[in-house]
Image (cartoon, helix red, strand yellow):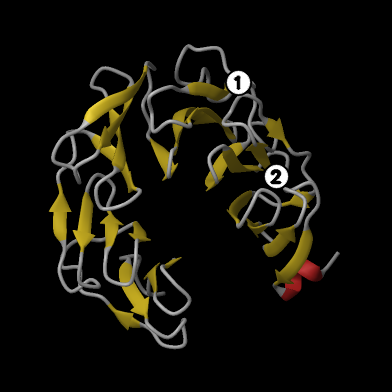
Amino acid sequence: MDFSDNVNGWAIATMPSQQTPYLIKTTDGGSHWKSVYTGNMHFGRMQMLDKNTGFGYTANAAYRTDNGGNSWVKVPTPANTRYTTFNNTKTGYVLTVVPGGGYKVMKTADGGHSWSTKLTVKTSFTVGGELYSKDNQIWAVLYGEAGMSQVSYSLYGSTDQGSHWKRVIGQDTAGGGPSPGGWTPVVKDGPAQPGGHPGNMQLIGKETAFLAGGSPAGEVVSVGVTYNGGKTWKNVKPTVSGYDGRISFVDGKTGWLVVTSATKSSIYSTKDGGATWSRKFAFPEAMEP
C-alpha cells in the first residue's frame, strides 16, 4: 500500500479464491476503492510519486504511469534485473544478478535509458535482494542461502547515491553459509537473533536508516539502526514476540511495527527508536496469555 497524500492511495490486493494480485486505488482516503487496469502485468510492489505518476514493479521489470494508472509504459532496465526502485521520474536503481555468481547495483539518471554500475558484490549463490533509496541514500539487502530457519545476508549502504559504499551487515549462519561479499562488515549480525531474517528498511534524512528483523527460531522481532550512514550500527535488543516484522518511521525516533506471528500478530509504536514498543492493535487471540 502506498499513499501519495492523505486521499490518494494505491494497494495490491488478492481475492480469497485466488492468489493473482490486483491493483486498486482510492481517491478519498480509503473509504472507497476501485480496480486499476494493468493488463497481463501483475505487480508485486507499487511506488507512487503523486496522484498521477508512479511505478509498478514485477519480479524483473518496471512500468511507469503518468495518468493515474490509465496506461503503463515499460521502463528500460538491464538484463537479469531482480529489483528496481526510483527516487523520481529520472533517478532510479536496479539490482541485477551476474551470470556465474554475484550481484550488481546500477543507477540511472535519465529514467532508465542508460545505466551505470555502482556496486559489484561477488558471491557463489544469488537468491536476490531488495533496494531502498531516498534522496542521497541507497541501501541494498543481498541474500545468500538459507537453512534451519536461518538466513545469510549482507547489507550495503551509501550516502552519496552509490559513489561510495560500506558493508554494514555481513551475517553468516550455520544454516545459510557465508553472506555475499568480501569486505569486512561493520557488524556480523543483523537485528533479531538467532539467524534473523531481514525485513524492510526505512530511510530518514541523509544518514539515518532502520532495518526490521525477525527470528522464527527465537520468536522475536526487532530493529537495527544507523544514525551516521552506516559508520556504526546498533541492533536494538528485542522486546517484541513474533516471527516477522514490517516498519514505518516518520523520523529517527517515532515509528510503527507490524508483527506477524502464529497467535500474536499485532501493531506497535515506538517513540525512542525501537528501544521500547507499545502495542496499539491486536487480534483477540493475541491478547490471550
Gap between marks 2 and 1 measured at Cα: 21 Å
State the quadrant of the N terminus. Answer: bottom left
Which label belongs to residue 174?
Answer: 1
Task: Name the quadrant containing residue 207.
Answer: top right
Q: Which residue corresponds to the image point at 78% horizontal and 39% vertical from the top-left?
A: 237
State the SS at label 2.
strand
Q: Which residue corresponds to the image point at 33% horizontal and 75% vertical from the top-left?
A: 24
- Residue 128 spot, x, y in % from top left: 37, 34
Q: Which residue corresponds to the image point at 52% horizontal and 21% vertical from the top-left?
A: 167
- The foreground one among 160 and 119 is 160
Instruction: Residue type at mark 2: give it.
Output: Ser
Which label belongs to residue 222?
Answer: 2
Q: Is residue 264 visible?
A: no
- The foreground one among 135 and 115 is 135
Earlier sequence position, callout 2 versus callout 1: 1
Q: Is 208 placed above or below 72 here?
A: above
Instruction: Residue type at mark 1: give it.
Output: Ala
Task: Name the quadrant containing residue 270.
Answer: bottom right
